[in-house]
Image (cartoon, rainbow, N blue to C red):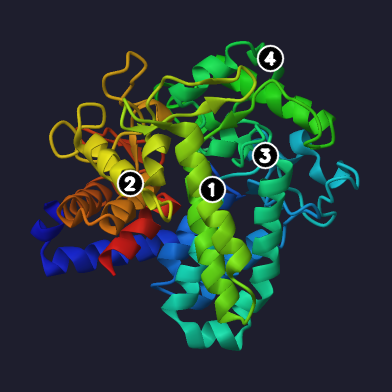
């Protein structure tokens, strides 16, 4: 509703404010999520940033994705962080000294010339590449943007489909909470409970210098993150054994299904065969419904692959299959109802979709991925609602997102009920999705 209450001058001011954030966060070849909290390039942040940047500079949006894929590993994985060598080690934990990617050995084929992490993040990139191309097909064709990116996107998706199908049912497993992009979601509390935290004295959290402790994960969370990442690193980032944490996450897999669909269109555009991508996209949607759909709850739940059981917590990841192509109509209708129902409360209790179930005792409106509303996930839901004909809800949500972005100076995340700002401000993907919604 609020979108329509923004006057034309207010919309213009919001657009130039968002553009200013993206220009300020641009470092020459990519965009930082935030100069204070995250001074490097993050994988799914870059995809969302490209989706917004295309409205300012399609060429720069292309470079955003190209620079990320420039750090792709030989096995096809796209690392979740590409480190900027000009930024001091102490500015972010865990930094290059922890991940040691260039020394990881040849098995996974980490690049030698650039330092990266060794884990991944949700695959929004093919969807972003297609949207960037469509914003200016002429420049994209002249630069051979899709022609150059296509083999890299295909290798990325193949890595996920082949090396990461740990449950054997056609879905990708994440090996670390950071891989979902939703670090401290209550969905990980169960799967993480048997992971012994590394003592807080063993590391120095740079995030608490700029961020408030009540808005961030706890030291115990970090102790577990460090334990898991160390085990993966010390095994050469190989995916050939069982780790303590392996989860099938509906958000990650839904974004892959949407990206495979986009990759089919990209293949067609450059005269390649779209069929394998179409087939993989529908297989992913099928596997999502078969393995993770919880009819009684009206949303998708995570599956703990190590314990062999569903995770009971209702998280926003369970709503993201709204964008999975070919979702059965009954499932889509139930998801739309869940967005507005008592657990997420959109339009009644909340102005933006929270990251976690309002009715769960684990819900916390301020603490990171345990309740606050995030602009990237709300962008996905807005798009999904529209894809299923829920236009009035999508309009209301888009309006609320613009209002919240304007009032919070492009906050990283907000209280889902009051839109009160938390985390960093002038945040990359918040500005980017704002530009996309205004276009
Ligand atoms: C957050 O995650 C990083 C680790 O990757 C962190 O907490 O330091 C998450 O919100 C993640 O989704 C996001 O991509 C990243 C950068 O914005 O920050």
Q: Quadrant of the C terminus?
A: bottom left
* Residue nearer the viewer, 298 or 405: 298
Q: What residue is shown with label 4?
A: 198
Q: Dot 1 corresponds to which residue?
A: 284
Choose between 224 and 113: the one closer to the eye.
224
Residue corresponding to mark 2:
378
x 45%, y 69%: residue: 131
* Between discs 1 and 3, the one toward the N terminus: 3
Question: Of the numbered discs in the image, which one, if any, rests on residue 165?
Answer: 3
Asked whether, in this view, residue 158 is left or right of residue 371, the answer is right
Reading the chain from its start, which is encountered first: label 4 or label 2? 4
The residue drawn where x is 22% and y is 38% is 337
Q: Is residue 242 above or below residue 166?
A: above
Secondary structure category for the residue under label 1? helix
Mark 2: secondary structure: helix
**Disc 1, disc 4: CB below 8 Å?**
no
Report the mark closest to the observer, 4 or 3.
3
- Secondary-structure class at tag 3: loop
Residue pictured at 67% horizontal, 39% vertical: 165
Of tags 4 and 2, the one toward the viewer is 2
Sequence-wise, the earlier of marks 4 and 3 is 3
Q: Mark 1 or mark 4, which is nearer to you?
A: 1
Separation (CA) of disc 1 from disc 2? 22 Å
């Amino acid at each position: 509703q609020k979108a329509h209450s923004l006057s034309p001058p207010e919309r213009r001011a919001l657009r130039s404010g968002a553009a200013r954030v993206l220009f300020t966060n641009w470092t020459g070849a990519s965009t930082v999520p935030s100069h204070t909290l995250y001074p490097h390039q993050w994988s799914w942040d870059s995809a969302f940033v490209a989706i917004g940047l295309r409205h300012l500079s399609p060429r720069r949006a292309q470079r955003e994705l190209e620079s990320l894929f420039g750090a792709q590993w030989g096995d096809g994985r796209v690392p979740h962080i590409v480190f900027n060598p000009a930024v001091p080690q102490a500015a972010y934990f865990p930094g290059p000294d922890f991940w040691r990617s260039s020394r990881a050995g040849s098995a996974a084929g980490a690049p030698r010339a650039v330092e990266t992490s060794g884990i991944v993040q949700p695959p929004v990139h093919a969807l972003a590449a297609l949207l960037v191309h469509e914003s200016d097909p002429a420049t994209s064709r002249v630069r051979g943007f899709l022609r150059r990116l296509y083999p890299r996107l295909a290798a990325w998706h193949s890595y996920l489909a082949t090396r990461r199908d740990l449950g054997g049912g056609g879905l990708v497993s994440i090996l670390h909470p950071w891989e979902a992009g939703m670090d401290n979601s209550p969905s990980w509390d169960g799967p993480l409970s048997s992971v012994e935290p590394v003592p807080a004295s063993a590391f120095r959290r740079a995030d608490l210098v700029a961020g408030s402790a009540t808005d961030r994960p706890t030291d115990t969370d970090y102790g577990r993150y460090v334990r898991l990442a160390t085990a993966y690193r010390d095994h050469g980032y190989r995916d050939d054994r069982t780790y303590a944490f392996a989860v099938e996450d509906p958000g990650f897999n839904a974004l892959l299904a949407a990206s495979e669909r986009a990759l089919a269109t990209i293949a067609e555009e450059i005269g390649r065969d779209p069929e394998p991508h179409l087939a993989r996209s529908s297989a992913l949607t099928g596997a999502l419904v078969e393995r993770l759909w919880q009819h009684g709850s009206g949303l998708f739940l995570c599956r703990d692959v190590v314990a062999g059981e569903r995770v009971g917590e209702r998280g926003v990841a369970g709503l993201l299959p709204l964008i999975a192509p070919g979702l059965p109509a009954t499932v889509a209708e139930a998801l739309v109802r869940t967005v507005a129902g008592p657990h997420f409360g959109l339009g009644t209790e909340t102005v933006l979709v929270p990251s976690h179930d309002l009715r769960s005792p684990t819900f916390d409106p301020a603490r990171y991925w345990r309740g606050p509303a995030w602009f990237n996930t709300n962008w996905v839901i807005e798009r999904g609602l529209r894809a299923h004909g829920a236009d009035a809800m999508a309009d209301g949500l888009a309006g609320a997102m613009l209002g919240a972005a304007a009032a919070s100076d492009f906050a990283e995340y907000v209280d889902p009920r009051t839109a009160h700002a938390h985390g960093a401000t002038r945040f990359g993907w918040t500005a980017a999705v704002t530009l996309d919604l205004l276009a």
